[in-house]
């Protein structure tokens, strides 16, 4: 595993936690942080393969993928749990 892998996951966790806190609730925060981590890991793999894992494109890609991962996982699990989606 590349030594830059875990530091690259921090934006995913931070973005996920912030998105989960905006939805309110412990469930949303934990699931959103997990989704952000998954999104950042996928983005890291793609950015490393494209040799764009240094600089601003990497930060933008990781942050955007983390938000998308948090949004999708939170929305999917809220629908599966029967909770009404927040507008």
Image (cartoon, rainbow, N blue to C red):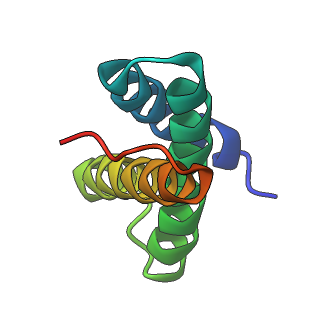
**Above or below: residue 26 compared with residue 8:** above
Residue beneath the point at 35% across and 31% down: 19
**Above or below: residue 6 compared with residue 76:** above
Left or right: 79, with 7 as reference point? left
- Residue 13, visible in the rendered structure: no
In the rendered image, the residue lying farthest to the bottom is 50
Quadrant where the image shows the N terminus? bottom right
Where residue 87 sits, quadrant-wise, is top left
- Count of all numbered marks drawn on residues in the image: 0
**Residue 36, x across and y down, in percent:** 50, 45
In the rendered image, the residue lying farthest to the right is 1
**Residue 72, x across and y down, in percent:** 42, 59
Of residues 27 and 6, the one nearer the viewer is 27
Residue beneath the point at 39% across and 52% down: 62
Left or right: 68, with 57 as reference point? right
- Residue 21, visible in the rendered structure: yes
**Residue 53, x across and y down, in percent:** 44, 61
Of residues 86 and 53, the one nearer the viewer is 86
Residue beneath the point at 53% across and 51% down: 82
**Residue 5, x across and y down, in percent:** 66, 49
């Amino acid at each position: 595993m590349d030594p830059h892998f875990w530091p690259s996951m921090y934006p995913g966790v931070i973005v996920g936690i912030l998105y989960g806190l905006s939805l309110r609730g412990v469930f949303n925060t934990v699931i959103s942080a997990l989704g952000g981590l998954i999104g950042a890991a996928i983005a890291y793999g793609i950015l490393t393969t494209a040799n764009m894992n240094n600089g601003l494109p990497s930060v933008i890609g990781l942050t955007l993928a983390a938000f998308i991962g948090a949004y999708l996982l939170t929305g999917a699990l809220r629908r599966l749990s029967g909770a009404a989606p927040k507008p």
